[in-house]
Image (spheres, helix red, strand yellow):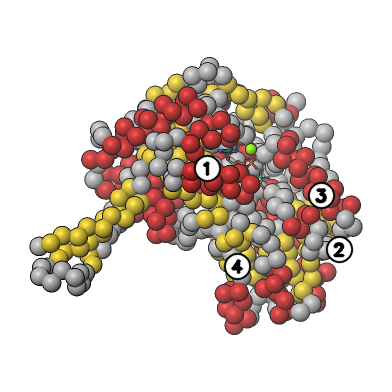
Amino acid sequence: MDAISDQRARLGDAAKKFISQPKKLLIDGLWVEAASGKTFAVIDPATNKEVGRVAEGDKADVDKAAKAARRAFESGEWPSLRPMQRERLLHKLADLVEANADELAQLESLDNGKPVMMARHGDVVMTAEFLRYMAGWATKIEGSTIDVSLSYVPQGQFFAYTRKEPVGVCGQIIPWNFPLLMAAWKIGPALAAGCTVVLKPAEQTPLTALRLGELAMEAGFPKGVVNVITGFGPTAGGALVEHPEVDKIAFTGSTEIGKLIGVNAMKNLKRVSLELGGKSPVVVMADADLEQAIPGAAMAIYFNQGQVCTAGSRLFVERKVFDKVTEGIAAFAKQMKVGPGLDPSTQVGPLVSQEQQERVLRYIQSGFSEGAKALAGGKKVGATGCFVEPTIFVDVKPDMKMVREEIFGPVVCAQAIDDVSQIPAMANDTIYGLGASVWSTNLNFVHRLIPKIKAGTVWVNGHNLLDPALPFGGYKNSGIGREMGRAVFDLYTETKSVCMTV
Ligand code: NAP
Ligand code: MG
């Protein structure tokens, strides 16, 4: 059986049907072709074969979508909905995600390459939970009453308060590593706050955002509230950032593009939040429970083929247990089953694209040429598909290219800790500051270390423990703003002060 028919044969009927339909843009409640009539290919990274085509939206389509989102924000049904009605709509969307969970997981696996079991029990479950958590906030966004003095107004009494109002039309640009989850992560809080959105998924992974758009229509969101434009970054994404009707840009992706978007958004003072790259440290102390820490550190990097912004890509291990931990991770890596994502027994799927595979292999090559040694992995797998072996490097120096730059692949670089007082300096020796994990049974030590680590999230005896109630975002070059939790509503609301003479 050739690989392509093999992959398609594993799709359920619903996913097969979705794949076989034409995939258009969602603008103002209607599915329409790109104004240019152009389409682009959706590639299965397990086979490098085209599995379908989607509309290639550009400036003209973004213009229509942004204007539709503006109309939906200012007039019609959406602005007059009560918070509880917005909450219900988001719960309905979560219900539909759950009802279509298998199909969504299969589409995600086909498009992104990730193991279907991870997509089903990770991405899709979390998508529904994130939407439900944000649904609850629709009724809980509140301002405050404030006692003012106004000493220079000798006579008079005053009543002052703040209102939290939706920021407006949101342009949301997302990456390919968690396509569905990122889409929900972005639209959830925006819709809970009463904003309208134009979502641009990554060119590599447009399928589940389109399916989510269908489900949003089925849930009953009024037309123009959720718009989805598939297309390329510089054209569709760039047009969103420049569009005068877009009030806010929310971006997740590379630091390089994030900086560009931040600068461009500032030109017309759009609100902008950026969730960018990382080079997150994993610190394993000699007193850690190694039976937990070894698989934990391995999955910190190998989960989702290492394509995670908080991937634990720099490993620091106390010298006493360095060999045991690195050899343990190497053994873990070697027994992981690499294969096409839609095979339910696969643990490591292909990377998202050939471009990404080549990029990761270049980093691995740079590691070898700078003198590092691979205890496991270090090669691509097979002649077709974007597979790379789970890899661990030792004999690593802090100034090596692969230690300094975000690889976004299943490659971890291990360094030994000789002086415990140097841990903060080692962990912080990066331009990034997204995540970090510490593995230790000495919680006094851990508590003293946490304030010294410059990262938006620190995990202890775990890694990538994400919850919609916990603010998420980066220090330094890892971004601006905190998504999730109560904090995300700072990004999707404006504060209006009201002061009244009474
Ligand atoms: P990227 O270029 O930053 O893409 C992220 C999103 O931004 C995509 O939707 C992309 O569209 C869009 N975009 C690209 N250029 C744009 C522009 N000039 N204006 C507006 N939008 C634009 O990321 P990538 O190319 O997919 O991946 C490159 C590297 O970024 C990875 O290897 C990894 O290091 C990092 N990355 C980080 C994260 C994260 O979560 N922190 C996620 C993904 C990637 P297109 O899809 O058409 O390019
Ligand atoms: Mg790109």
Q: Are marks 2 and 1 in contact (CB under 8 Å)?
A: no
For marks 1 and 3, the one nearer the N-term is: 1
Where ligand 2 lies, by quadrant? top right
Q: Which of the pair 240/316 is nearer the observer?
A: 240
Q: Are marks 4 and 2 in contact (CB under 8 Å)?
A: no
| 155 sits to left or right of 424 | left
Q: CA distance from mark 4 to mark 1?
A: 27 Å
Quadrant in which residue 314 is drawn: bottom right
Which residue in the structure is indicated by mark 4?
A: 454
Q: Would residue 95 be found to the left or right of residue 449 on screen?
A: left
SS class, disc 4: loop
In space, the residues marked 4 and 3 are separated at their CA atoms by: 27 Å
Residue 364 percent location from the top left of the image? 81, 49
| In this rendering, the label closer to the viewer, 1 or 3 | 1
Of label 2 and label 3, which has the lower sequence position?
3
Q: Amino acid at mark 2?
A: Asp
Three-letter code for the amino acid on which mark 3 is drawn? Ile
45 relative to 30 in the view: left or right: right
SS for callout 1 = helix
The residue labelled by disc 3 is: 364
Tell me whether circle 4 and circle 1 mark residues in contact (CB < 8 Å).
Answer: no
Q: Position of residue 382 (x, y in %)?
A: 82, 37
Mark 1 neighbour density, 10 Å: few (under 14) some (14–19) many (20 or more): some
Asked if one can make out residue 100 in the rendered structure from this viewpoint, the answer is no
Give the mark nearer the N terminus: 4 vs 2. 2
